[in-house]
Amino acid sequence: MFARTRVGLWAALLALLGLIGGATPAYAFSTGYFAIASSGASGVSAGHTGYGPGWVALTFDTGGQPHGPIVGYLFHDGVGQAVGNDHMDVYSYYTAGAASVNTPFAGGYAYGHFNGCAWSYLDMNAYELYPEGAHHNPPCTTPPNHTTRIFCYDHAADRLCNDGTSVSDEPEAGVWKNITSHQATVKAGGCDVVGNIGSAAIYSGGAAAPANFIGHVNSGTVYVRYVSKRDDWVMGNLATNASPQFPAGIQWGFFPRGCLS
């Protein structure tokens, strides 16, 4: 009850400030249909964990809090080859911090090229989301709750998949926790990297729908977070020796499995 009251007070206060100052963004802890802010409007000049100028990352619920790995992105028009602003239909907030960050998360339906329920990273000082109206369909009142076994965990077939038993200190089947210890090398010819493969490929092992090109990596090392259920896409982080780096402070992206050794 106290948390709901506090959220209501914050929303009322920020709404009042918006009326007085006219320039204060007013998304904080309100629900409804939100667009992704531009790089200039967001106030974020560099990439951070889960958000940056003109983009915000998505994750999912692993048991009471948004603690999963990044599963996709929402982009402002022109960032990540987005045509028009992506949107998040927000139904709830998680304000305690999770997923190794102290920022809040907005829960709801993520449009763009993700198209599914998710948690969106937020930064209270950057305002990546701004309100555009009431809820749209389909509804998403409860963000998805999954174990990491929604990803590939057949380590015998693909050593980039984590079965939770074959590697010491890596008990969570599906994802790697010690990121820098699990590396792959970009093959000759490089990799076209995208920001989204779609919620169906993430949550249910459906066919990937790659979209939002974020860069071509010619060479270097990729730190592996997970491999998709169909063993066809790798969510990876660029090491500092990878060239070139992604734009807008983005560090994570989906690499075709076949372009990584």
Image (cartoon, grey):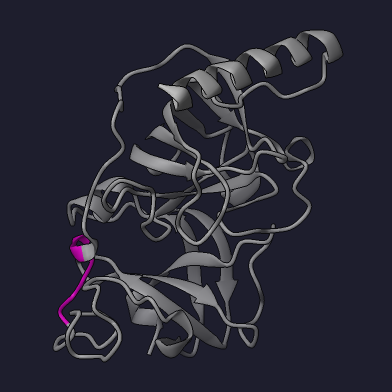
Quarter residue 251 falls in: bottom right
Residue name at image x 83 percent, y 9 percent: 20
Where in the figure is residue 220, as x and y percent of width and height? 56, 88
Quadrant of the drawing holding the C terminus? bottom left
The residue lying toward the viewer, choosing from 172 and 218, is 172
The residue lying toward the viewer, choosing from 15 and 133, is 15
Where in the figure is residue 125, as x and y percent of width and height? 72, 40
- The secondary structure making up most of the magenta span is loop
Q: Is residue 101 magenta?
A: no
Quadrant of the drawing holding the N terminus? top left
The residue sitting at the right extreme is: 21
User: From the viewer's perspective, is residue 252 above or below residue 102?
Assistant: below
Query: Which stretch appears magenta?
Result: 149-154
Marker count (numbered): 0
User: From the viewer's perspective, is residue 147 above or below residue 137?
Assistant: below
Q: Is residue 30 visible?
A: no
Where in the figure is residue 214, as x and y percent of width and height? 57, 60
Q: Is residue 6 visible?
A: yes
Quarter residue 197 falls in: bottom left
The residue lying toward the viewer, choosing from 171 and 246, is 171
Residue name at image x 72 percent, y 24 percent: 25
